[in-house]
Image: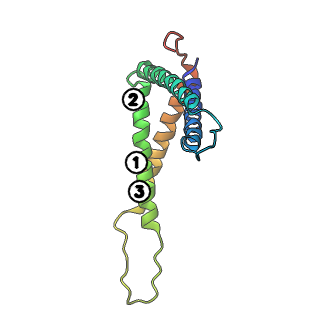
Amino acid sequence: MKIAELLMERKDIQIKLAEIKERMNSVVRIQEGDIPEIDPLVLIKQFEETNKRLVKVVETIEKANQETLIDKEQTLAQALVEREGLRRQHLFYTSVINQASEKVHRYSNSEIKDIVTVDVADLHKKKDQVAKKLREIDAKIQEKNWNVEVEEKQY
């Protein structure tokens, strides 16, 4: 099984757990005399079994991420951490650029004028550089996710 397939299964399991929780919330308290549409004990059992499966899938993914080299010096786990850092950086630059670029309408010359305290053009360059690195590392991660087989004994 490929890492990417495990990632898709993880997402499906997370959705299933959310659905079980939602169903449980609808039957955990009912009016006196009513019968719940589904037995809460059945839902609890489904949740526990599904959650155990999620734990196994996540453990397998994490183990594969720690063991898989993306290049000579970096594991897939390290690349994922780096990608998260680049995403945060990209979001930060985007936010600052948007804030600095916001037009302020003054109704008269007597109103206090706002000034921009950052070099927006320079931030655009930095944001573009980060975006390029982000695309490159994401492509490497995706390639590994679709090419690396996870051993059945891990799974």
- The answer to whether residue 121 is visible is no
Q: Which residue is rendered at x = 58% and y = 17% of the image?
A: 1
* Mark 2 → mark 3, Cα distance in angstroms: 26 Å
- The residue identified by callout 2 is 78
Nearer the observer, 28 or 133? 28
Please say if 127 is above or below 11.
Answer: below
Numbered disc 1: secondary structure: helix
Residue to which mark 3 is pinned: 123
Mark 3: amino acid: Leu
Q: Is residue 63 above or below residue 21?
A: above
Mark with earlier residue (1, 2): 2
Residue 89 in the image: x percent, y percent?
A: 40, 48
Give the number of callouts. 3
Q: Are marks 3 and 1 in contact (CB under 8 Å)?
A: no
Q: Which secondary structure lies at badge 3?
A: helix
Number of the label disc, if any, that sits on residue 15: none
Note whether residue 103 is visible: yes
Looking at the picture, tell me which residue is in the foreground, 142 or 46: 46
C-alpha span from label 1 to label 2 = 17 Å
* Residue at horizontal 44 percent and vertical 58 percent from the top: 95
- Say the numbered circle drawn on residue 89: 1
| Kind of residue indicated by mark 2 | Gln
